[in-house]
Amino acid sequence: MVRVVWEVQGVIDENIKKVTLVSALHDYVLTWYIKHSNDNPNAGIANILATLNREFSRPKFEAPSIIGFKEIMMLPGETHWELDQRLKCIICEANMDLMDGQHCKWFVASLMPHLRNAVSQQKLTTQVEALEIVMRLHETPM
């Protein structure tokens, strides 16, 4: 996007390019850029963009968030509602736009094995529906 703006406006000055690049960056990336600029004050725009692309390639950038989802499991004594709230906090911290179906899959995957097996047999469309089914299963005697 930034490159297109430079081309349309005919920007060739390195300092102007750096200023427009910084204005397009957000939180985590901006923090990275500030550190990179302090460590490499004479880096040209080509070097900055190449390093930026390498640093934030999709799989590497999303890895910490995805690891958090893979590792979440229902704790002993934890209620289903508390598990759901913990999962929602991780989603919020990861700053991800998550479809309800994916939230539902991660919720079901984090349940205790006996509940996970029973819930995965159901045709679930939303996470709220999964939570309701888990609560009903938990209330019924086995």
Image (cartoon, grey):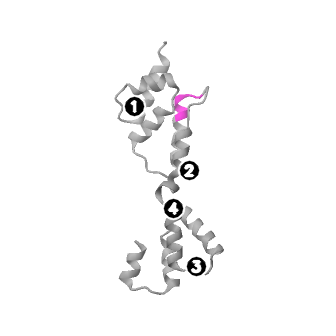
Give the labeled residue for mark 1: 129
The percent position of residue 78, horizontal first and vertical second, equals: 59, 29
Q: Residue at x 36, y 26 (%)?
A: 122
Give the labeled residue for mark 2: 64
How crowded pointer 2 is (Cα within 10 Å; few <14, some 14-19, many 20+) is rated as: few
Q: Residue at x 39, y 78 (%)?
A: 5
Is tag 4's residue or tag 2's residue first in the polypeptide sequence?
4
Pair 4/1: label in front? 4
Give the labeled residue for mark 3: 43
Name the amino acid, label 3. Ala
Is tag 3's residue or tag 2's residue first in the polypeptide sequence?
3
Give the labeled residue for mark 4: 56
Pair 1/3: label in front? 3
Give the residues drawn in magenta, as a range.
78-83
Is tag 4's residue or tag 1's residue first in the polypeptide sequence?
4
Q: Outermost residue toward the top?
A: 142
Is tag 1's residue or tag 3's residue first in the polypeptide sequence?
3
| Distance from Cα at disc 4 to Cα at disc 3 | 18 Å
The percent position of residue 64, horizontal first and vertical second, equals: 56, 50
Identify whether 89 is placed above or below 28.
above
Name the amino acid, label 2. Pro
Q: Residue at x 56, y 33 (%)?
A: 73
The percent position of residue 17, horizontal first and vertical second, equals: 48, 80
